[in-house]
C-alpha cells in the first residue's frame, strides 16, 4: 500500500511538472502577460523604483538602492542565514578535523 501511495504521488508530481513545462504561460500568469514572447512585463512597482529610486535613496545604481534601501530587512535576514550556514559548516569541519587526530 505504501509503494502504491508513493507511485501515485510521484505520478501526480511528474504530471504537474509535465503540464507546467508544456504550458508555461498558463501557470502563474494571466493570459495577457507577454512574458516569453513580446515586450517584457513591467509592473507599477517597477515604474515606482525606476522613477523614484535615485531621488529617495541618492544611489546611482538602482539595484543597490532596491537591495539596501527598499529591502533592507530582507537583505539583513538573508545575510544572517548565510552567516549561520557558514558558521555551522565551519563548526562541523572543525569537529571532523579534531576527531580525525
Image: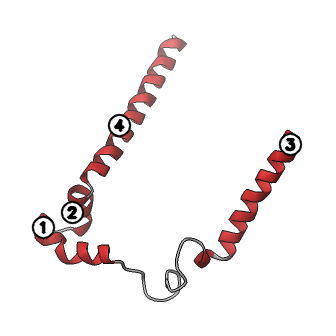
Q: Which residue is mark 3?
A: 3
2 or 3: mark nearer the eye: 3
Circle 2 — which element? helix
Q: For the point 28% across and 45% down, which residue is it?
A: 76
Which percent across, then down, holds residue 98?
A: 47, 13
Q: Tag 1 or tag 2, which sits nearer the N-term?
A: 1
Q: Which residue is mark 1?
A: 56
Q: CA distance from mark 4 to mark 1?
A: 30 Å
Q: CA distance from mark 4 to mark 2?
A: 22 Å
Q: Which residue is mark 2?
A: 65
Q: CA distance from mark 2 to mark 1?
A: 9 Å
Q: Tag 2 or tag 4, which sits nearer the N-term?
A: 2
Circle 3 — which element? helix
Q: Are marks 2 and 3 in contact (CB under 8 Å)?
A: no
Q: Are marks 3 and 1 in contact (CB under 8 Å)?
A: no
Which percent across, then down, holds residue 64?
A: 23, 61
4 or 1: mark nearer the eye: 1
Q: Is residue 84 above or below residue 79?
A: above
Q: Tell me, for residue 83, which label it has, or none.
A: 4
* Residue closest to the eye, 1 or 64: 1
Q: Are marks 2 and 1 in contact (CB under 8 Å)?
A: yes
Q: Tag 4 or tag 3, which sits nearer the N-term?
A: 3
Q: Tag 3 or tag 2, which sits nearer the N-term?
A: 3
Residue 70: image quadrant is bottom left
Q: Tag 1 or tag 3, which sits nearer the N-term?
A: 3
Circle 1 — which element? helix
Q: Are marks 4 and 1 in contact (CB under 8 Å)?
A: no
Q: For the point 27% across and 56% down, which residue is it?
A: 71
Amino acid at each position: 500500500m505504501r509503494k502504491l501511495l508513493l507511485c501515485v504521488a510521484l505520478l501526480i508530481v511528474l504530471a504537474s511538472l509535465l503540464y507546467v513545462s508544456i504550458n508555461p504561460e498558463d501557470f502563474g500568469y494571466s493570459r495577457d502577460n507577454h512574458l516569453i514572447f513580446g515586450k517584457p512585463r513591467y509592473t507599477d512597482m517597477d515604474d515606482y523604483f525606476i522613477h523614484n529610486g535615485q531621488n529617495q535613496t541618492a544611489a546611482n545604481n538602482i539595484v543597490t538602492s532596491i537591495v539596501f534601501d527598499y529591502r533592507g530587512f530582507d537583505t539583513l535576514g538573508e545575510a544572517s542565514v548565510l552567516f549561520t550556514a557558514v558558521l555551522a559548516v565551519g563548526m562541523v569541519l572543525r569537529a571532523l578535523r579534531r576527531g580525525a587526530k
